[in-house]
Structure formats: C-alpha cells, structure tokens
Amino acid sequence: MSDTNTVHPSKAGSVQGMFTRIAPRYDLMNRLMTAGQDVRWRREVIRRAELPPNARLLDLGAGTGDLAREALRQHPDCWPTAADFTLAMMLAGQPHSPAQLAWAGADAACLPFPDASFHAVVSGFLLRNVADLQRSLQEQRRVLKPGGRLVALDTTRPRRSLFTPLVQFHLHAVIPALGWLIAGQREAYTYLPNSTESFLRAEELAARLAAAGFRQVAYRRLMLGTVAIHWGVKE
C-alpha cells in the first residue's frame, strides 16, 4: 500500500531493493490489502486535483503509475508524468501505460523539474516515508503553477476506538501474511504497517501542508481512520 519515494540515504538502497523485489506483485497486493478500495481512493485523488483542460500533472512516488493512468481516464487530454526512484516499479507499470504518460526518475526531496511546471502534484502513499517531509512539500509547491493543487493519499495514524483491535490485526497479521503468500515478501509487508503507525496523524499532516505554504488545506479520513486524502492549493 505504499508507493516508493525518498528515504534517508542510509536506507535508500535497502528500500529500493525491497520495492524492486515486490514490483511484480505490487498492484495485486494493493488491491488485496485494501479490499479493492484503493482504486476508489485514487479516483477521488484525481477528482480533487481539479485539473483544467490540457493539464500537466505530476504523479510523485508513482510506483507503477496508477494515479497517472487514472488521471488519463478522467481527463484524456491531460499530460501526466509518473516519477519514482525505483526503476523496477516504473518498468512494471510501463507495459500497461499509454505513450501519453511520461516517466522520470526523481527524488521527492529534489525534483528535476522547473518551477511552476505542473497544474497538480498527486501522490499515493508517498509522504510517510520521505526523509525530510517539509522539504518534499516545499519542492512539490515549487513545481506547481499558481493556483495548482497538491493532493496526497497516504496512511495516517488512527485514533484509538472500538475498531482498534481489528485495525491492529489487519496491519500486523493479515498484511504480512498476504505479503508472504502473494509476493513471497513478509519483511516488506511488515515494514509497511510499521511505517503507518509511526507516521503523522491526519491533522498533523494538514498543519505541515499549511506550514509549507499551501492554502485551503483540508483532508478526509478513510478505512477506519487508517488512510486519509489531504489537499491544498498554491496561491
């Protein structure tokens, strides 16, 4: 449930290796872990991007390019770029992608794009793994055109509730078991739940977006409070 992205340099090689190993089963695991709900979430991400005609969109930490392809389904006239730092993930997504979709190797903390290049920057499960969250948010704001929107789908640390035991069982038993059975990678799918529990709460991430200079910041919680979509505007 996590697209690849920027991590601390000492961990970058191991994380890239991990995503290289799970790339062939990556999309299938996303569908299974979320019971197919991630497809609906990605549709909402693109709707909230509010793309104008002929928009240029950056799918950052794109993995296999799910969000970029969803953008083309909703806006066939848009020009998406899928950017990631793991080659194997992008190679897994390219055979299923139209020629209109561009691909780029990119570090989320130092984007290789000029200022004001995109009408929207979207991401799926990127932010919780970046080494310097504020720098990444500022970079995303930099490459947005004035009035452009950032929309981020990510896990969020849930509040304790009656559903907490169910959430814990899903994170620490179901997901690692699926990772072992489907992808043969229990370690990778133990890392992903752990990163969920160590990430910011939804309201804390909203505050980070505001601190990075975004306005009209808001969010919506999903999946028993374990996932959220955040958005903000560059004014």
Image (cartoon, rainbow, N blue to C red):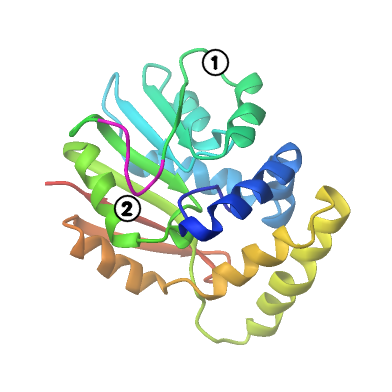
Q: Quadrant of residue 186?
A: bottom right
Of the two numbered discs 2 and 1 in the rendering, the one whose residue sits closer to the viewer? 2
Q: Which residue is disc 1 drawn over?
A: 98
Q: Is residue 104 above or below residue 168?
A: above
* Magenta stretch contains residue 53: no
Prevailing secondary structure class for the magenta stretch in the rendered image: loop
Q: Is residue 67 left or right of residue 218?
A: right
Q: How many marks?
A: 2
* Magenta stretch contains residue 110: yes
Q: Position of residue 24 (x, y in %)?
A: 75, 37
Q: CA distance from mark 2 to mark 1?
A: 28 Å
In what element is the residue under mark 1? loop
Residue stretch rendered in magenta on the structure? 107-113
Q: Which residue is disc 2 drawn over?
A: 136
Q: Is residue 138 above or below residue 111?
A: below
Q: Residues within 10 Å of mark 2 (few under 14, many from 20)?
A: many
Q: Position of residue 149 (x, y in %)?
A: 26, 43
Q: Is residue 96 left or right of residue 107?
A: right
Q: Position of residue 180 (x, y in %)?
A: 84, 57
**As rendered, which of 120 and 26 lies closer to the eye?**
26
Asked if residue 1 shows in the view, the reply is no
